[in-house]
Image (cartoon, grey):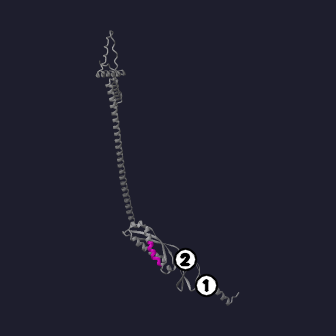
Amino acid sequence: MVLGGFDIVVIALVVFVILVLFAGIKTVPQGYRYTIERFGRYTRTLEPGLNLITPFIERVGARMNVMEQVLNVPTQEVITKDNASISTDAVAFFQVLNAAEAAYQVAHLENAILNLTMTNIRTVMGSMDLDELLSNRDAINDRLLRVVDDAVQPWGIKVTRVEIKDIQPPRDLVDAMARQMKAEREKRAQVLEAEGSRNSQILRAEGAKQSAILQAEGQREAAFRNAEARERLAEAEAKATKMVSEAIASGNVQAINYFVAQKYTEALASIGTAGNSKVVLMPMEASSLIGSLGGIGAIAKEVFGDNPTPPPAPRAQSTPRTAPAVNPFNPPTER
């Protein structure tokens, strides 16, 4: 089929319309913003979705990512306030809030944020001592975030976080810090040991004091009890002696016999229970004890004037008797 001139014009017109439609329809993905320029001048920002622009008059100027982005800060040397050289690196999180300002207020946005962050890291960390720097990372992060965020606000950027990842002091400085930490811990251990020893001595002294007080109170109570017991025993002895004396005065000889026999038997009991004697040999019998008591009674009668009748003289025996065998445990008594 041969196409005429009119058909060619129609086909060309249709192709042109299609090209114009494709040039005027812009699809913006989620998380991005497109700036539109008309003859090179910014006019508006396209939101995510399907958008129409004027072909050949308007064009897309910049495609800005408005999602939160991560920017790695490379390792750099920092000299602290006390002249300690350290190596540190960091990471920064930022987000584009205004696509037009981010596109037209600064060139090379990421490079600008990176250099700004590195400069402020040197400034903030250089104003601190090494010990303060190692122990106050949160304070460093807060200061960096505040300074960098204030600096990028004219660019339509929001810095959400700035984190120091690692701080590396020199090896010799690390060894010195380790020795310092060890010495500090040994000092604390010695202080704690001294305090424990002092508290232990105080407690032992308090215990000895309480023990001495209780022992003294116990001895005082025991002495009081012993004195009271001796007093009662003396009263009982005086009362018994008085009763015996009254009985003797009234002419009762049996009372003194009982009193002497009691003391005699108590003396024998003391001899038998003595600690330095294991075996006691006593050359006497029960009849000898009774005879001794009888003799003591006779002496008492003579003392108090009651003359007893003398015993009858022994009668002579016509027939001789053999001498009895001598008992080694009961020798004969001399008359």
Q: Residues within 10 Å of mark 1 (few under 14, many from 20)?
A: some
Check the image and report above or below for 259 versus 197: above
> In the rendered view, would you say 139 is above or below 245?
below
Q: Which sits in the foreground, 269 or 83? A: 269
- Assess whether residue 153 is covered by the magenta stretch: yes
In the image, the segment drawn in magenta is: 144-154
Farthest residue to the top: give it.
318
Q: Which residue is mark 1?
A: 20
Dividing the image into 4 quarters, which one contains the C terminus?
top left
Looking at this view, name the residue that lies furthest to the front: 250
In the foreground, 271 or 144: 271
Residue 139 position, x and y percent, is: 43, 68
Going by the numbered disc 2, the residue's amino acid type is: Tyr
Residue 276 within the segment the image draws in magenta: no
Instruction: Determine the secondary structure under disc 2.
Output: strand
Furthest-bottom residue in view? 5
Residue 115: which quarter of the image?
Answer: bottom left
Residue 216: numbered disc: none
Q: Residue at x 66, y 88 (%)?
A: 10
Residue 158 percent across, percent down from the top left: 49, 75
Left of 44 or right of it: where is 299? Answer: left
Tell me which secondary structure the magenta stretch mostly adopts.
helix
Q: Position of residue 265 (x, y in %)?
A: 35, 27
Label 2 packing within 10 angstroms: few (<14), some (14-19), many (20+)? some
Query: Real-space Cα distance between discs 2 and 1?
Result: 24 Å
Residue sitting at the far right:
1
Q: Which residue is mark 2?
A: 32
SS at circle 1: helix
